[in-house]
Image: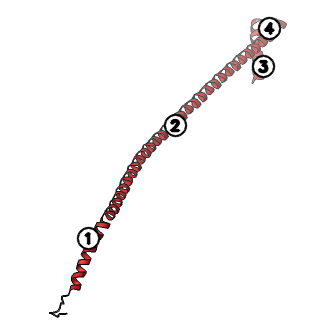
Amino acid sequence: MEVTGVVQFNWTIIMQLINTLIICVVLGKVLAQPIHNFVKKRQDAIDASLDFAQQKNQEALELKREYELKIRGAQKESRDIISAAKAKADNRYREIINEADRQADELKRLAELEIEREKNKTVYEAREEIVSLAVFMAEKILEKELDEKEQRAFIDRILKEVGKTDV
């Protein structure tokens, strides 16, 4: 062995370098295709996963749009139901008011008929009373033949008596 400077030159290092190159070339030839295939499969799997994720993302966005449309439809339907219920309640309110007005009018009409009947009854009774009174006065006059002055005094006295009894 020869010693020259700091680095020694011997054939062992050259052989090691040649062996390393041979191993690299052999391993490159033997393992290059499987490694390339592995990397390709891994890249394809990653691409498929990204495509799948993008597809699922699109499906989720579509579902979101559908649900938003359904929510808007449900909100519109609920507003329509509320409006219909309000209209129905308003109609029922008007029906109740109209029925109450009709019943009040009927009660008023019946009361007016009752008042008219009572009025007619009172007039009839008053007429009966007047007729009775006239008959009574006629009987008294016939019982007593009086002259005109006495008849007037007699009628006045009877009217005063009748007036005192009615009050």
Q: CA distance from mark 3 to mark 2?
A: 72 Å
User: Depth-wise, is mark 3 or mark 1 nearer the camera?
Assistant: 1
Q: Regarding mark 2 in the picture, which secondary structure is present there?
A: helix
The numbered dot on residue 138 is 4
Q: Which amino acid does the dot numbered 2 rest on?
A: Lys
Locate the C terminus and report the quarter of the image it occupies. Answer: top right
The numbered dot on residue 86 is 2
Mark sitting earlier along the chain (3/2): 2
Give the image location of residue 59, x and y in percent.
Answer: 40, 48
Q: Nearer the viewer, residue 112 or 104?
A: 104
Q: Regarding mark 4 in the picture, which secondary structure is present there?
A: helix
96 sits to left or right of 143 = left
- Residue 154 in view here: no
Q: Which amino acid does the dot numbered 3 rest on?
A: Glu
Q: Which amino acid does the dot numbered 4 rest on?
A: Ala
The local crowd at label 2, few if under 14, some if 14 to 19, many if 20 or more residues have their Cα within 10 Å, is few
Q: Quadrant of residue 111?
A: top right
Give the image location of residue 23, x and y in percent.
Answer: 28, 74
Residue drawn at x 78%, y 19% as measured from the top left: 161
Residue occupied by mark 3: 161
Q: CA distance from mark 4 to mark 3?
A: 15 Å
Q: Regarding mark 3 in the picture, which secondary structure is present there?
A: helix
Residue drawn at x 23%, y 81% as measured from the top left: 15
Locate the N terminus and report the quarter of the image it occupies. Answer: bottom left
